[in-house]
Image: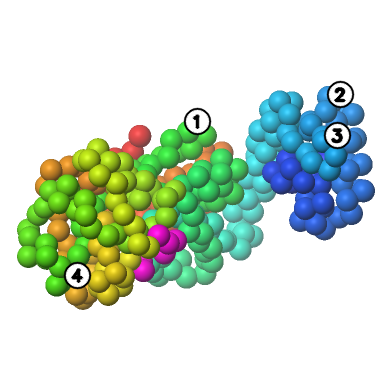
Amino acid sequence: MELLQLHYFIAVARLEHMTEAARSLHVTQSSLSKTIQRLEEDLGVPLFDRAGRKLRLNEYGRKFLRRAERALLELEQGKREIKDLSGLEHSTLELAVTTASTLPHILRAFRKRMPDVHFHVQMLATQEMVTLLQRGEVDFGLSSPPIEGDEIECQIVCVDPIVVAVPTGHRLADRNSLSLIELKDEWFVGVRKGYGTRDLVDAVCESAGFVPRYVYEGDEPARLSALVEAEIGIAFIPSSARNSRERIRYIPVEDRELVREIALLRHKSRHVSRAAQEFRKVVETYFGGMSGTGHSF
């Protein structure tokens, strides 16, 4: 069995399409098909169910995929560890986030501490982050809600209350607190389903007896404040994302526990480079300076 076979198999398994996999690998489809066929011959079992040009991982394939991904992850982490120890690593920090409200402050502090380290950030829905974490493709995830798993280390760094954001001319703008059911006839702006805060808010509202009506659902949480200010709708905003310069009133909910937990996540097998160690320190320091800091588990 060759490493090339594993790389090719993983690409085909993830896409379940030979042509697309060949394109992503920059190889011919016939070469890719022959490599997969030799791998199946080596293993003595088919890894895919085939119906014409369609491929579907079978039970053998699903089990082998987990092992193949883990094997290549270990090799990649070994390379990263050696480069890091030898001082030859041109560090790039790979990050995935489901919550971005605190990210600018954290990245600014990290850049001051390690100006030569490049970073790449992806804003993802929860399930997309789970996939990258399970593959060990990111150094850290910053997520709300926390994500648990056998291979995922989860450190809660902040417990962040969620408040209701209304424009200053709104009927509730002069309130110091409100009951959730008072919002049942309101129009909301929010992120789309799949983001942790949205899913949490929807569940709490349903437990209070209503389903929020959204006039806007997007992928950019930072845009919500501008929409509230423009009186397009009201929004549930994490307390850490409040901006005192906006013409918005932020009102606590009095009768329901409405808080989000922010967690720092990593794959347990991924090598923690010196850059990643410094990033963890920056995150801990930042949230440690805020009220409501959580704990590890």
Task: Report the magenta residues as a range.
Answer: 217-223
Q: Secondary structure at mark 2?
A: loop
Left or right side of 125 for 76: right
Residue 46 x, y percent position in the rendering: 83, 28
Nearer-N-terminus badge (2/4): 2
Residue 275 x, y percent position in the rendering: 49, 57
Q: Secondary structure at mark 1?
A: loop
Q: Quadrant of residue 175?
A: bottom left
Q: Amino acid at mark 3?
A: Leu
Which residue corresponds to the image point at 36% horizontal and 46% vertical from the top-left? 199
How far apart are the alpha carbons under marks 1 and 3?
A: 29 Å
Q: Amino acid at mark 4?
A: Pro
Residue 15 x, y percent position in the rendering: 71, 46
Q: Amino acid at mark 1?
A: Asp
How far apart are the alpha carbons under marks 2 and 3?
A: 8 Å
How far apart are the alpha carbons under marks 3 and 4?
A: 61 Å
Camera-nearest residue between 113 and 221? 221
Q: Residues within 10 Å of mark 3 (few under 14, many from 20)?
A: many
